[in-house]
Amino acid sequence: MQVLNPNNVKIYNLSAGKSLPEWLSDRKRRALQKNDLDVRRRIELIQDFEMPSFSTSIQATPDEQYIMATGMYKPMVRCYELKQMSMKFERCLDCEIIKFCMLSDDYSKMALMQSDRYIEFHSQASKYYRIRIPKAGRDMAYHTPSCDLYMSAVGPEVYRLNLEQGRFLKAIRTDSMEVKCCELNPVHHLLGLGTAEGQVECWDPRTKKRVGLLDSAISSISEVSDIEGMPAVTALTFQGGLTMGVGMSTGQVLLYDLRSNKPFLVKDHNYGLPIKKVVFHDSSRLVLSQDSRILKIWEKDSGKAFTSIEPGVNLNDLCVLPNSGLLFMTNESPKILSYYIPSLGPAPKWCSFLDSLTEEMEENPAPTVYDDYKFVTRTELDGLGLTHLIGSKMLRGYMHGYFLDVRLYHKAKSLTEPFAYDEHRKKKIQEKIDETRQSRVQVNNLPKVNRALAEKLLEQEEETTAKKKVIAQPANLLKDSRFADMFKDSAFQVDTEADEYKLLNPLVTKLEKNRKKKDLQQEAIDAQFEEVEVGGGGGGDIEVLFVWFYYRRKAAAVMMMRVQRVQMI
């Protein structure tokens, strides 16, 4: 479970949790759930609440006992029983489902609109009948008193199929080129039709005549709107007998009082994406509007933002359980998203434990990759010596590499690099010791990395300072923080024996020759004298020590003169 807090409103993501690879068998899944604490703590509100590839639409039955969802691939519809919190059945179809409509209070009767222009009717047992409409369908609505099924399509007509008589009736013909959505008012059964020209036509199902026309396209355009093309109506919904919500293809939501031809509120998503769903919340004066990117929740009267949910995947449909804070969203991923917002309302009766469980199981965001598997490239696989496993069940190809069991990875790593951990541990301990020593009195010692180079730089600095031939001293690399890693990290160790080093660093080679000359001079001076041990008491020892230093200094001066003469010759 993951807890979000946008705008100081707690949102519990019930779909978050540790992901399990699809290739695991059911037996391995059960074993993993038994042994792994993270998997065991994951909340699976409804068992198998997902689709093979992605989910398209979702609805709750009128009796609020079942959830119906459609998805791909393959095309299928699934029914979930909320009391049992599990899937009741699934049915595979021949073509993608565009919309579906419940014809009864439970799951026993429903109509499915498919992309091949067929309307399939399903009973409690299985598919009952299918019929074809003249043009590709867009939306449908069921008028319970007359048993008429209204189906909008790519064209000006809205087809009427009477389910009691079992035949088509005279279609409703609009003034538009295409009817994108249709919705029936639950109180007085006024039929609203959203057109591609941005208009909303209202029809009376009793007289089959148009009783009103709203031009929502003009109302959605403002001075600051950046709109290209004609705004179309993509979503319709009603609340009570007088309030209507209209979603536009340009990202605006308009709220109307049916007694007025102008909206009393215009809410802009500011993304320019078509509005896919508008829902009025029952127990609060809030509106939920959804496009493909975000779900926004805002106040009905003022339009002030309440909170929002942005899952990071493209959204397709929204289902809010009545008088509760639980909502579901279909999207372009296998898992159907489940969210619980206590500020909207309490948890439903069938999952009343959510109120106490959400406060106890707040966790950090779950990782997007599998925790039990390590992603390795082909080069890393060669280093581990596991290339012979390619093609077996131990490796799963993914993008430019493979998924490898993390236990096998650590075992192979320990065999190929047996001392890697010990070296890493010693390095970390030494770094901690060096950090603690920084607060003490420091002695200017030469670094361990590139020690010879540091010694040469110090000698060059001393010679330059002694001669005083330059006004501005160059920057010292040993004291410059930009080059600190050069004398700390072993990766920057200079190989003085390489040919490239000798060609690209003539200055350092010259300094090396000067240093060798000085070492030879010092060795020649030390060879002429023997070490004198100063011991015992009395003043004689001090006199001997003084004489020794005097003659040593004089001999050094003589030797320097001889060397200079040799160099001049």
Image: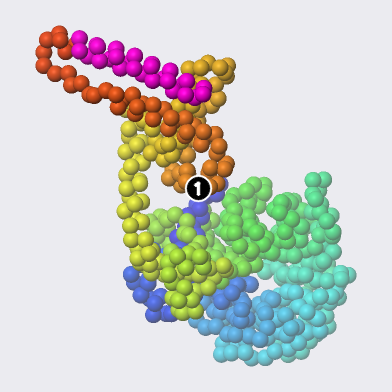
- Does residue 486 appear anywhere in the picture? yes
Residue type at tag 1: Ala
Up/down of 223 relative to 534, above or below: below
Q: Is residue 564 magenta?
A: yes
Figure label count: 1
Would you name the residue on which mark 1 appears? 498
Q: Front-most of 496 and 157?
A: 496
Residue beneath the point at 47% across and 34% down: 512
Relative image position of residue 504 (x, y in whole percent): 57, 41
Q: Main secondary structure of the magenta part?
A: helix
Q: Quadrant of the rendered structure where residue 83 is? A: bottom left
Residue beneath the point at 74% across and 70% down: 182
Q: Quadrant of the rendered structure where residue 436 is? A: top left
Residue beneath the point at 78% across and 63% down: 233
Relative image position of residue 510 (x, y in whole percent): 51, 33
Q: Front-most of 395 and 130?
A: 395
Instruction: Point out the residue furthest to the right here.
Output: 175
Pointer 1: residues within 10 angstroms few (<14), some, or many (20+)? few
Please provide the residue range marked out in magenta.
Answer: 543-569
Q: Quadrant of the rendered structure where residue 452 is? A: top left
Instruction: Point out the residue furthest to the front here.
Output: 569
Instruction: Point out the residue furthest to the left here.
Output: 537
Q: Is residue 209 magenta?
A: no
Up/down of 416 relative to 84, above or below: above
Q: Is residue 543 left or right of residue 7?
A: left
